[in-house]
Image: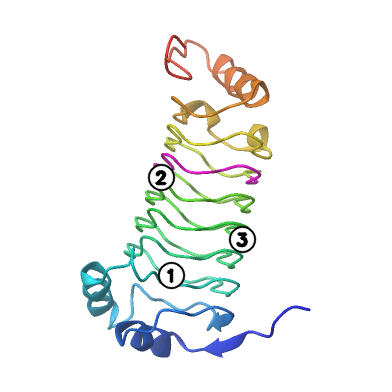
């Protein structure tokens, strides 16, 4: 049985974070909340940068943050397994070392996001925009990239084994897969996309390539 979510206004959420609260599991934030445009955003950013988020991470597991606008948010070590960020805007945000297993990122704007060393296992990234995003060292096993934009996305040294619908993603030929952990299935998709680009010459997988 799915646990009922507790509704929370955006202003209340920000105030609780700044006051030191960390566990926001099973909440539903007001839809369309413009966090980056909120008057208390700068104060929140200063607080988060000064906090020891590795020791005491923010937890939003099983919560819903649909259409949240949080461009530039600094929130490494976030624990967000099974959260819903559908249609969210997080351009330039820092989610390094975060836990995003089974997360709904459909249609999310994730351009230039830092997700280095994060876990996105089984996450849903269909139609998401990952332009110039850093997924270095991330776990992407089972993640669905159907229709996602991977234009100049950096997946260097990431675990891409078992990734879903890579062949249906856009701009795969521009993605950096150097030293990524790939099966022959993923390699064949990448080669096909590169071969489709006439005159394309790049080293694919590191080592001898």
Q: Position of residue 204 (x, y in %)?
A: 48, 18
Q: Position of residue 96 (x, y in %)?
A: 37, 53
Give the structural element (helix, strand or loop) at label 2: loop
**Mark earlier in primary sequence (2, 1):** 1
**Mark earlier in primary sequence (2, 3):** 3
Tell which tag, 1 or 3, sits nearer the viewer. Answer: 3
* Residue positioned most to the front: 55
How packed is label 3: few (under 14 Cα within 10 Å), some, or many (20 or more)?
many
* Magenta-colored segment: predominant secondary structure: loop
Horizontal side of residue 175 vs 57, given as left or right: right
Horizontal side of residue 8 vs 169, given as left or right: left
Give the structural element (helix, strand or loop) at label 1: loop
Give the structural element (helix, strand or loop) at label 3: loop
Residue at point 55%, 71% (across, down): 61
Disc 3 target residue: 104
Name the mark on residue 133: 2
Please tell me whether residue 112 belongs to the stretch shown in magenta. no
Q: Position of residue 53 (x, y in %)?
A: 32, 67
Residue at point 63%, 53% (across, down): 124
Residue at point 39%, 68% (across, down): 70
Which quarter of the rendering shows the N terminus? bottom right
Horizontal side of residue 143 vs 76, given as left or right: right
Disc 1 target residue: 69
Residue 136: quadrant of the picture: top left
The stretch in magenta equals 132-144
Q: Is residue 38 above or below residue 57?
A: below
Q: Confirm or deny contact between disc 2 and disc 1 (CB under 8 A).
A: no
Residue at point 37%, 50% (across, down): 114
Tell which tag, 2 or 1, sits nearer the viewer. Answer: 2
| Distance of label 2 from label 1 (alpha carbons) | 17 Å
């Amino acid at each position: 049985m799915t646990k009922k979510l507790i509704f929370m206004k955006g202003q209340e959420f920000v105030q609780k974070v700044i006051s030191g609260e960390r566990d926001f599991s099973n909440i539903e934030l007001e839809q369309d909340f413009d966090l980056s445009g909120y008057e208390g955003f700068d104060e929140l950013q200063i607080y988060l940068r000064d906090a020891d988020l590795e020791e005491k991470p923010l937890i939003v597991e099983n919560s819903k943050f649909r259409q949240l606008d949080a461009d530039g948010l600094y929130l490494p070590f976030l624990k967000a397994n099974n959260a819903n960020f559908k249609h969210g805007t997080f351009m330039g945000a820092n989610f390094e070392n975060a836990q995003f297993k089974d997360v709904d990122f459909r249609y999310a704007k994730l351009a230039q996001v830092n997700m280095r060393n994060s876990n996105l296992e089984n996450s849903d990234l269909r139609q998401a925009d990952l332009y110039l995003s850093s997924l270095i060292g991330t776990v992407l096993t089972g993640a669905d990239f159907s229709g996602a934009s991977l234009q100049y996305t950096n997946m260097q040294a990431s675990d891409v084994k078992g990734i879903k619908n890579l062949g249906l993603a856009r701009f795969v030929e521009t993605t950096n897969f150097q030293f990524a952990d790939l099966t022959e299935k993923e390699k064949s998709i990448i080669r096909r996309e590169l071969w489709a680009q006439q005159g394309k010459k790049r080293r694919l997988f590191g080592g001898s390539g």
